[in-house]
Image (tube, coloured by chain):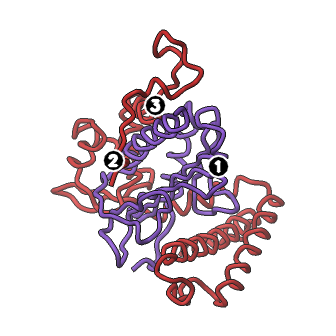
Amino acid sequence: MNTDEKTLDEALLRKVAQRLGALTLIDTVRVFPRQKPESVVAQFDDVYFPEEIRRVDLGLRTYQNGDFNVIYREVRSGGDWMVRWDRHDNPHNTRDHYHQPPQARTEDAVDRKYPTDFFDVVTMVLTETDIRLGEVWEHTER
Amino acid sequence: MRWQIICVFSSCLYTTMSSDGDSDRPPKLAEEWEQQREKQSTRERVYAVSLQLYEPTRVAIVADRADVSKETAREYLRWFTEIGMLTHDGESPDQFSRNESYFEWRRIQRLQAHPPEKLEEELEQLTATERDYRDRYDADGPGEVDALEHADYTDLESVWMELQEWQTVRRRIRELEQARQNQNGSAQAPA
């Protein structure tokens, strides 16, 4: 169950943060900020999304038992648009699962199968984020 | 469930685009991420995989994940074992896994590098955060909380995540105290 002892993998998260910080579209990366003590938070440069979105960020956590949780969030005035990629035991889905947008609630979860390696998981997340950013622009320009 | 629409006309994404093609288009996140990997040395690639050896793992699997030869993988794995980052879990077949006490030691070392007043300040803030969790959940620690009492089904995962954060804050407090003790030279040698 989820309340088992598990330790945040800070060494891996720092490595991921270092690489994310070097990406063109990412403006700042915060490592374990006070309000989110377990997360690496990558904030996107706002020239790459339309004005109606106030902020776009990606929050990542990973643990020493292989569990992880990655959240993509668009902060909008009418409510956030978010998705979540999760790996952890739970009563509702397989260990690897995905919380669908726009709210990414528990009941929005569907089973998925992710790569073993966390850097490959990030590749997949970024691929889906690229597609989403494309959609956001398309939608805006019509 | 993936996002359904594939943006075929990705060149329409960026208003700053010049009409003559891709020169002004910023790189795709995933492409840049992959390019970073291609630039990594064999050592960095084996290190990135080694960081994730949560279970005893065979050399061939590490080699495959790091995209290096078995010999190269074995060489680095032995070296990482020598510095204490990994443990050698058995021969024939050779297996390696993370040595968690090394990572804990490294976290404490990182803290120890800060000036004492900075650690003091950090400790005060974390202690305040920890008190907030206690008040919110009316419990002494995350292990005593029944998440279901604090959430309906919809919010269950948010509560789990918060309890997990609480646990991390408590661990950081312990490690900060350890770092301060070490700075004061009163560290007990491990038995």
**Where is residue A70 drawn, in percent x and y?**
47, 56
Q: Looking at the image, which residue is at 41% across and 59% down?
A: A100
**Disc 2 sits on a residue from what chain?**
B
Q: CA distance from mark 2 to mark 1?
A: 31 Å
Which element carries disc 1, helix, strand or loop?
strand
Chain coloured purple here: A
Please say whether residue A22 is visible from this viewpoint. Answer: no
Residue type of the residue flagged with mark 2: Leu
Q: Looking at the image, which residue is at 24% across and 61% down?
A: B90
Chain coloured red here: B
The residue closer to the viewer here, A91 or A7, is: A91
The reply, left or right, for residue B28 in relation to residue B17 is left
Residue named by callout 2: B77
The residue closer to the viewer here, B27 or B166, is: B27
Q: Earlier in the sequence, mark 2 or mark 3?
A: 3
Residue named by callout 3: B28
Q: Are marks 2 and 1 on the same chain?
A: no
Residue type of the residue flagged with mark 3: Lys
Can you tell which quarter of the image residue B69 is in? top left
Can you tell which quarter of the image residue A47 is in? top right
Q: Residues within 10 Å of mark 3 (few under 14, many from 20)?
A: some
**Where is residue B54 drawn, in percent x and y?**
36, 61
Q: Residues within 10 Å of mark 1 (few under 14, many from 20)?
A: some
Q: Looking at the image, which residue is at 64% across and 89% down?
A: B140
Residue named by callout 1: A30
**Disc 1 sits on a residue from what chain?**
A
Can you tell which quarter of the image residue B126 is in? bottom right
Q: Residues within 10 Å of mark 2 (few under 14, many from 20)?
A: many
